[in-house]
């Protein structure tokens, strides 16, 4: 797993929203915001799969995802590519879900929990980090996990 640089972690915490990109087996892409997430101390990002629609279905077939975070005032941003797994372990799923829900406001919490009785939990493992800033080399990773799979993903031509 590649470590997410501190400046990106600070931006994620400041903006409090992630844009998750996924694609199905045919390559049809989907983007979706996430506000119910947790940055774990091991570098993983967990988020609640509340509605189990396109992203949820996509990651069951194609675990590669992209997360974008940006500061719209400073016009800077970053893209993190990695793999997502749906957390099956009940104890871990419960512990992380509670941590995420505790961060939510009372109004937001009631709306989410009232609509969703069976929450899914996704775990994102960073593999590649890119800058989205136009003044930096957008094609050059800021960080990459040195595995054949990650190196091949970094070279993919979309």
Image (cartoon, rainbow, N blue to C red):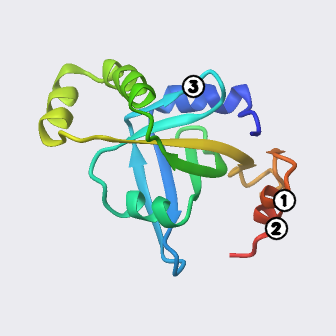
Cβ–Cβ under 8 Å for marks 2 and 1 = yes
Where 127 sits versus 21, above or below?
above
> Of residues 120 and 107, which is closer to you in this image?
120
| Residue denoted by label 3 | 40
- Find the residue positioned furthest to the left: 114
Where 34 sits versus 12, above or below?
below
Residue that appears at 83% across and 55% down: 137
| Residue denoted by label 2 | 155
Residue that appears at 55% across and 65% down: 62
- Find the residue positioned furthest to the bottom: 26
Dot 2: what SS? helix
Q: Is residue 87 left or right of residue 147?
A: left
- Residue 157 screen position, x and y as percent: 75, 75
| Residue denoted by label 1 | 151
Mark 3 and mark 2 lie on one chain; the one further toward the N terminus is: 3
Can see residue 109? yes
- Residue 37 screen position, x and y as percent: 44, 33
Dot 3: what SS? loop
Residue that appears at 49% across and 77% down: 28
Quadrant location of the C terminus?
bottom right
């Amino acid at each position: 797993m590649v470590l997410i640089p501190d400046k990106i972690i600070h931006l994620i915490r400041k903006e409090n929203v992630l844009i998750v990109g996924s694609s199905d087996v045919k390559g049809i892409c989907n983007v979706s915001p996430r506000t119910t997430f947790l940055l774990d101390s091991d570098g993983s990002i967990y988020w609640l799969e509340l509605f189990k629609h396109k992203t949820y279905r996509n990651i069951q077939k194609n675990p590669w995802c992209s997360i974008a975070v940006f500061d719209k005032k400073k016009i800077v941003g970053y893209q993190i590519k990695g793999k997502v797994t749906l957390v099956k372990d009940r104890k871990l799923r419960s512990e992380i879900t509670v941590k995420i829900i505790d961060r939510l406001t009372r109004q937001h919490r009631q709306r989410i929990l009232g609509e969703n009785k069976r929450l899914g939990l996704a775990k994102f493992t960073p593999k590649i980090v890119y800058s989205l800033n136009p003044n930096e080399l957008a094609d050059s990773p800021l960080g990459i996990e040195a595995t054949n799979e990650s190196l091949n993903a970094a070279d993919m031509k979309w």
